[in-house]
Image (cartoon, rainbow, N blue to C red):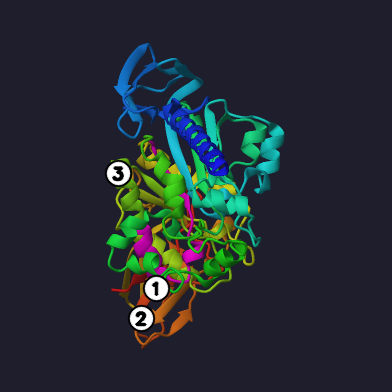
């Protein structure tokens, strides 16, 4: 009897201790994880500051000589919204409730860009072709702040330990803090993101905040809200039967299996699974206003061209819906490499521009490596993305695209393809050229019966001219349609033409 009483007392004490700890955790005043020293808040949009506290607590937030108050709801969430503000700083943010206080320092107002995707976005500055010299020069732009939300473990071919597996199941995969740009913080940050931000900051002369959330190898579906995928009749199978879905690359299934060798939970999560990276990495950011997104991903979906197009279009529309406004979304077309489906995939990415307003695509096929899926020329990629933003978001008079094929006309035994510089203030192509005046390469013709043939092509002013053999019935012109291509059509701004297919009229 005495033993039972002792056991009961021990259990009671443990329960009281646990409840006390729970109440302490709930009552602790917290800011959302993205609010840290050195951060950048988005200019020209209402400034939201939010976090958690005990239920029903009055929270006061002071910022830019103003103090706002909010009462936490039943779940402890609270939020205040300060008026729209122009770029500036540094500022302090003070948050207080009861006897608790949090103070942030060195907070800037400027433009916040989200840098997301897979390994080519994750590719660090130190490993890029120009990175070592950039870091050696040490000319870090004080206007740039970076938040590298890195994964707690890589998705390489390794088995994860039990601690990692538990954290991943709690959606605790991403971690990181805001930092002022330095040689150290720049070295491990996305090379593409770095060069993008450097060009934007130099042109706009405002603070630029770069948030990197990218996972090597991650498929597109991992970045889309799983609930949204389930709502799309043609995509719901990705969530319901991921291990057998035609949308899922076999390589992704294999890597999940390798990482989860030590898993004991039958419902163990993984960053490649539908919705995971959205839930763990993107959703926590959706209350933070941003200027836009730059994206470099697709390698893990290249096996299913049509499937990727459907998923990617869903991703962009759903992210914009979650943020509540149609922010610009600039993405990188895959480079060239000796892998099947890549020409069709690149062409599909090009065609998506017509389906997604306020979007742009940076071409990188001329920067590819025939054997390496991680080409090192990231400076050019970042700067091409920045040109799109400068033209479309910041309304600058710049050429931001390579030659864009408008129409292909067959007449008098030859096909003449007319080009423009795409949208913007310079809609008409000034000149077509090749680097070092080399012979024009990369063009093929597709006959009505499906035969492909390589052809000689030449530049004539604003057109490319291709001679056609007598009797040949041509349906389509293809450009840069080899997986690894040396196609070499550029414009006067030094920007390459995209892989494209165009019907002959």
Residue ranking furthest to the top:
65
C-alpha separation, residue under disc 1 versus residue under disc 2: 8 Å
Residue 279 x %, y %:
42, 49
Q: Check disc 3: other Cα within 10 Å, few if <14, some if 14-19, many if 20+.
A: some
Q: Read off the magenta span.
A: 290-314
The residue that label 2 is drawn on is 474
Residue in front for this viewpoint, 367 or 488: 367
* Residue closer to the observer: 19 or 311: 19
**First-in-chain label (2 vs 3):** 3
Which residue corresponds to mark 1? 477
In the picture provided, is 19 more to the left or to the right than 419?
right
Residue annotated with mark 3: 326
Residue 483 lies within the magenta run: no
Contact check, label 1 and label 2, Cβ < 8 Å: yes
Residue 372 is left or right of residue 25, and the answer is right
- Residue 221 lies, in percent from the top left, at 42, 60
| Residue 276, placed above or below residue 382 | below
Q: Nearer the viewer, mark 2 or mark 3?
A: 3
Judged from the image, the secondary structure of the residue bearing numbered disc 3 is loop
Mark 1 Cα-neighbour bin, 10 Å: few <14, some 14–19, many ≥20: many
Provide residue 50's location: percent of width, then percent of height: 38, 29
């Amino acid at each position: 009897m005495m033993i039972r009483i002792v056991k009961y007392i021990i259990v009671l004490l443990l329960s009281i201790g646990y409840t006390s700890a729970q109440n302490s955790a709930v009552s602790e005043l917290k800011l959302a994880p993205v609010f840290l020293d050195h951060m950048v808040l988005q200019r020209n949009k209402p400034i939201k500051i939010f976090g958690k506290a005990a239920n029903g607590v009055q929270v006061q937030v002071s910022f830019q000589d103003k103090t706002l108050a909010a009462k936490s709801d039943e779940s402890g969430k609270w939020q205040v919204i300060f008026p729209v503000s122009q770029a500036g700083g540094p500022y302090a943010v003070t948050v207080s409730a009861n006897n608790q206080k949090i103070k942030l320092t060195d907070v800037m107002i400027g433009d916040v860009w989200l840098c997301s995707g897979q390994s080519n976005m994750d590719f660090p500055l130190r490993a890029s072709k120009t990175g070592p010299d950039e870091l050696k020069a040490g000319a870090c732009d004080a206007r740039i702040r970076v938040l590298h939300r890195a994964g707690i473990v890589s998705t390489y071919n390794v088995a994860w330990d039990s601690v990692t597996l538990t954290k991943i199941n709690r959606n605790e995969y991403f971690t990181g803090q805001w930092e002022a740009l330095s040689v150290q913080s720049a070295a491990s940050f996305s090379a593409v993101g770095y060069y993008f931000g450097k060009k934007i900051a130099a042109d706009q002369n405002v603070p630029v905040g770069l948030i990197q959330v990218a996972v090597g190898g991650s498929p597109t579906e991992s970045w889309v809200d799983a609930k949204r995928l389930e709502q799309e009749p043609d995509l719901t199978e990705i969530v319901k039967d991921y291990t057998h879905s035609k949308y899922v690359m076999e390589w992704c299934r294999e890597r999940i299996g390798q990482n989860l060798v030590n898993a004991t939970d039958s419902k163990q999560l993984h960053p490649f699974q539908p919705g995971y990276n959205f839930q763990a990495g993107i959703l926590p950011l959706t209350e933070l206003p941003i200027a836009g997104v730059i994206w470099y991903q697709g390698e893990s979906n290249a096996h299913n061209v049509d499937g990727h197009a459907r998923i990617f279009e869903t991703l962009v529309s759903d992210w914009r819906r979650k943020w509540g406004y149609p922010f610009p979304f600039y993405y990188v077309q895959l480079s060239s490499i000796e892998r099947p489906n890549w020409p069709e995939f690149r062409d599909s990415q090009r065609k998506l521009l017509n389906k997604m307003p306020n979007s742009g695509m940076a071409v990188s096929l001329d920067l590819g490596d025939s054997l390496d899926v991680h080409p090192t020329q990231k400076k050019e990629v970042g700067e091409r993305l920045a040109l799109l933003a400068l033209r479309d978001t910041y309304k600058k008079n710049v050429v931001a695209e390579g030659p864009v094929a408008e129409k292909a006309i067959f007449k008098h035994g030859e096909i003449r393809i007319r080009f423009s510089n795409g949208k913007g203030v310079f809609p008409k192509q000034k000149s077509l050229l090749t680097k070092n005046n080399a012979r024009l390469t990369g063009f093929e013709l597709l006959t009505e019966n499906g035969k492909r043939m390589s052809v000689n092509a030449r530049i004539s002013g604003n057109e490319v001219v291709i001679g056609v053999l007598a009797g040949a019935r041509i349906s389509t012109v293809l450009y840069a349609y080899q997986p690894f291509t040396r196609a070499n059509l550029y414009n006067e701004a030094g920007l390459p033409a995209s892989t494209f297919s165009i019907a002959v009229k």
